[in-house]
Image (cartoon, rainbow, N blue to C red):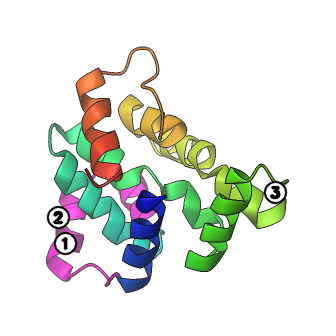
């Protein structure tokens, strides 16, 4: 729960990326299709993604995975409060529908978007399966670095 509270307050207090940060993202992502996915995210999600990418470090596919791991959220119109309600509602095993259900499926949505845009297998896998165990064929060190960075450890 501390992770969720930290994410909530980080979300509502975040600032848009600076031009230098935007250029860094542009340089890190290999295609216009991937850049479009990143920049279609809310500024709060962009800020989180950059923080994860910087914390995770490593090779280009790890950076790509960090920058794109939450792009599925861009297809859902929930803000901080709605996202929080969806997460808590789901944690309480309450039935979810509509935008709450779509938000909770953002990993699968994002993985499909990344795959369609030509993203790396690591980026697709991390969007689809985080948080959780690395799927077969994914380097455990990459996965551990991404998970730790996403959780703020």
> Which of these two is toward me, 106 or 100?
100
- The answer to whether the residues at label 3 and label 2 have Cβ atoms under 8 Å apart is no
Instruction: Report whether residue 109 is seen.
Output: yes
Q: Is residue 72 left or right of residue 52?
A: right
Q: Is residue 104 magenta?
A: no
Residue at image x 24%, y 72%? 22
x, y percent for residue 56: 21, 46
Q: Earlier in the sequence, mark 1 or mark 3?
A: 1
Camera sees residue 39:
no
Residue at numbered disc 3 = 96
Please indicate whether residue 19 sits to the left or right of residue 41 in the image.
Answer: left
Residue 141 in the image: x percent, y percent?
23, 26
Dot 1: what SS?
A: helix
> Image point 44% across, 15% down: which residue?
136
Residue 101 position by quadrant: bottom right
- Binning the other alpha carbons within 10 Å of mark 2 as few (below 14), some (14 to 19) or many (20 upward) gives few
Q: Which residue is mark 1?
A: 21
Callout 3 secondary element: loop
- Rounded to the nearest angstrom, the CA distance separating label 1 from label 3 is 36 Å
x and y, in percent, of residue 126 in the image: 43, 38
* Residue at the disc numbered 2: 24
Q: Which mark is residue 125?
A: none
Note whether 119 is above or below 103 in the view shown: above
**Mark 1 vs 2: CB contact within 8 A:** yes
Report the span colored magenta: 14-39
Rounded to the nearest angstrom, the CA distance separating label 1 from label 2 is: 5 Å
Residue 92 x, y percent position in the rendering: 73, 53
Q: Is residue 29 magenta?
A: yes
């Amino acid at each position: 729960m501390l992770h969720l509270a930290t994410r909530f307050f980080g979300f509502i207090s975040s600032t848009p990326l600076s031009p230098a940060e935007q250029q860094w993202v542009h340089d890190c992502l290999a295609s216009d299709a991937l850049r479009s996915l990143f920049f279609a995210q809310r500024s709060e999600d962009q800020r989180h993604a950059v923080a994860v990418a910087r914390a995770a470090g490593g090779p280009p596919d790890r950076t790509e995975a960090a920058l794109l791991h939450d792009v599925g959220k861009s297809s859902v119109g929930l803000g901080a409060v709605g996202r929080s309600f969806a997460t808590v509602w789901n944690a309480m095993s309450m039935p979810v529908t509509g935008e709450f259900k779509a938000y909770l499926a953002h990993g699968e949505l994002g993985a499909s978007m990344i795959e369609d845009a030509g993203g790396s297998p690591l980026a697709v896998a991390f969007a689809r399966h985080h948080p959780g165990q690395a799927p077969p064929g994914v380097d455990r060190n990459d996965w551990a670095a991404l998970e730790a960075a996403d959780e703020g450890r």
